[in-house]
Amino acid sequence: MNCRSVAHDWTELNEGNLPFWRRAGLRFHLAVCPACKVYVKQMGATIEALHEVEEPLPEDESRAIAERILRSRK
Amino acid sequence: MPSPEEDLVARLRAGDEVAFTKVVSEHHKALVRLARTFVGSEAAAEEVTQETWVALLDGIDGFEERSSLKTWLFRVLVNRARTRAKKQGREVPFDLDDEPHPDEARFSSAGFWSGPRPWSEADIDHKRVLEIVRREVDRLPGAQRAVVIMRDIEGLDAKEVCNVLAIQETHQRVLLHRGRAKLRSIIEKELGKP
């Protein structure tokens, strides 16, 4: 296992889709590799930011869209 | 006692406009963003989204609740967007190619990070990261963008995304990982380090 393996398999590892030995190998590498620890934290920060990308529409805009759609059906 | 989703569906069936406005508020922007992935222009994406809302209102009585309302909405949108894209002669390829990992050049021949290290934690400015992600997610290749929008922005699970896009789970994971890794790599470049 090396840094490339971590960079390639991080999502698979995170989603619990890897066989036991591969998972164990990656976890061991992660425990001892400072660069990979940073990489994993950055991937986490990227996903955290993605969770915040979409904000709900302001109420007046949602109401205007909803009214337009409801009108279009009448 | 009905779940919040059952309650929402019941209110939509009863023609409750407040409930409909709430669903629009929660999902409209994400639906437009996802539609844009397939149809290209903002105007076409808005139209496809509007058709999806009409389909929701017309079809809510027949909604069997085998999936969540959100998954159902996304599936209707993707089907409509794909049909429209086809008519426009556009197609978002969902095949996996041999695209290299965005950081491939950063590894030594032994597969260890070489050269400068990735951006350090101390430099993570959350506001800046969010700004970059907001802009760059719309520049990802279509298939990666569609998966990232549904998984990481809208919070659908892997099975739901596969269901909406009609792709295999392994395929979905590769697209998700490529999209996420590309965004991380762009953030790294923009933050000026290395």
Image: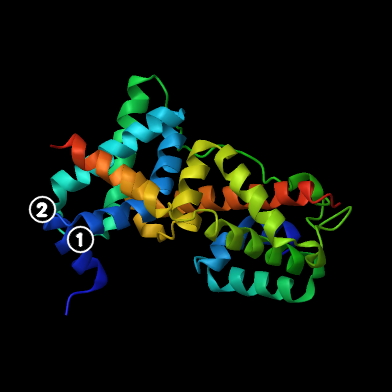
For disc 1, the marked residue is B66
Q: Residue at x 20, y 60 (%)?
A: B66
Q: Is residue A16 above or below residue B54?
A: below
Q: Amino acid at mark 2?
A: Asp
* Res. B161 in view: no
Tell which of B26 and B106 is nearer to you. Answer: B26
> Contact (CB < 8 A) between labels 2 and 1?
no
Which quadrant would residue B80 be assigned to in this image? top left
Say which label, 2 or 1, has the lower sequence index: 2
**Residue type at numbered disc 1:** Arg
Within 10 Å of the Cα at label 2, are there few (<14), some (14-19), or many (20+) other Cα atoms?
A: few
The numbered mark 2 sits on a residue in which chain? B
Q: Quadrant of residue A33?
A: bottom right
What number is the disc on residue B86?
none
Question: Does residue A22 appear in this view?
Answer: yes
**Residue for badge 2:** B61
Q: CA distance from mark 2 to mark 1?
A: 13 Å
Q: Is residue A10 left or right of residue B52?
A: right
Q: How many marks?
A: 2
Q: Where does the image place residue A8, in percent across and percent down from the top left?
A: 64, 55
Q: Position of residue B74 (x, y in %)?
A: 33, 48
In the image, A23 versus B77, the foreground residue is B77
Identify the residue at image location x=63%, y=65%.
A44
How packed mark 1 is, by other alpha carbons closer than 10 Å (few <14, some 14-19, many 20 or more), is: few
